[in-house]
């Protein structure tokens, strides 16, 4: 029986951002995935950082699988040169399909949609729907404030440290992937404080 190919889901901006370092990080991650023979799963677009990571991974000989809703295909942003493109009905179906295809999640700089995807994957892990690693590629400190806010959640009692530790962070793609290789999800239940007498 052929072993299942390893794939990582990457969330990132459909815009390139103002700093060239964001594109350079996307290219570096793409080449590292291809070098390790890890497939790339992403949102299927041909624009911004999304298009850049796909094209770079393909050029490096890597597998690239896109998942895109019909609405975005109709707006002509779908990448037509991928290893495989899944066209789905909705954003909800897109996120589920990307998760099903992947053994981990890496988030690069992006906007609201990128953060929403990251936190949904992280929430699924916290609730025990999966035990896959979730990481932030912290390009030039882009996610430093977000990491600090998650520490604040712990400080104020809205997040336990074991769940905070699920977020792997590194500025270097190779080092972040190394963390993925050794990741073991913590064995804790979702922490919900029950009032006495209830």
Image (cartoon, rainbow, N blue to C red):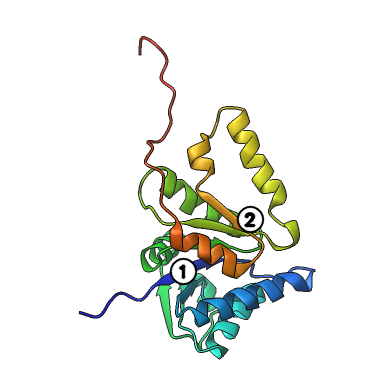
> Tag 1's secondary structure?
strand
Asked whether, in this view, residue 150 is left or right of residue 38, the answer is right
Q: In the figure, residue 102 lies in which quadrant?
A: bottom left
Up-down relation of residue 112 to residue 195 (above or below)? below
- Whether residue 35 is visible, yes or no, is yes
Q: Earlier in the sequence, mark 2 or mark 1?
A: 1
Q: Where does label 1 land, which residue?
A: 8
Q: In the figure, residue 148 lies in which quadrant?
A: top right
- Whether residue 77 is visible, yes or no, is no
Comparing labels 2 and 1, the label whose residue is closer to the camera: 1
Whole-percent x, y for residue 112 in the image: 63, 55
Up-down relation of residue 98 to residue 146 (above or below)? below
Q: Nearer the viewer, residue 118 or 79?
A: 118
Whole-percent x, y for residue 20 in the image: 77, 74
Q: Where does label 2 land, which residue?
A: 112
> Tag 2's secondary structure?
helix
Whole-percent x, y for residue 25 in the image: 67, 72
What is the distance, in whole Å, between disc 2 and disc 1 at their CAs?
21 Å
């Amino acid at each position: 029986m052929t072993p299942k190919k390893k794939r990582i889901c990457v969330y990132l901006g459909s815009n390139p951002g103002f700093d060239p370092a964001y594109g350079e990080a996307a290219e570096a991650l793409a080449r590292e995935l291809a070098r390790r023979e890890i497939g790339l799963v992403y949102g299927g677009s041909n624009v911004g950082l999304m298009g850049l990571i796909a094209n770079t991974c393909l050029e490096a000989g890597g597998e690239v699988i896109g998942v895109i809703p019909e609405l975005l295909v109709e707006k002509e942003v779908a990448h037509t040169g991928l290893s495989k493109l899944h066209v789905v009905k909705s954003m909800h179906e897109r996120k589920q399909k990307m998760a099903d295809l992947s053994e981990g999640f890496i988030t690069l700089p992006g906007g609201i949609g990128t953060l929403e995807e990251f936190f949904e994957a992280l929430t699924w892990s916290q609730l025990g729907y999966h035990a896959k690693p979730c990481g932030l590629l912290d390009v030039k400190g882009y996610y430093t404030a977000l990491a600090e806010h998650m520490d604040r959640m712990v400080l104020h009692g809205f997040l336990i440290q074991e769940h905070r530790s699920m977020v792997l962070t590194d500025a270097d793609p190779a080092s972040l992937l190394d963390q993925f290789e050794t990741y073991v999800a913590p064995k804790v239940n979702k922490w919900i404080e029950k009032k006495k007498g209830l």
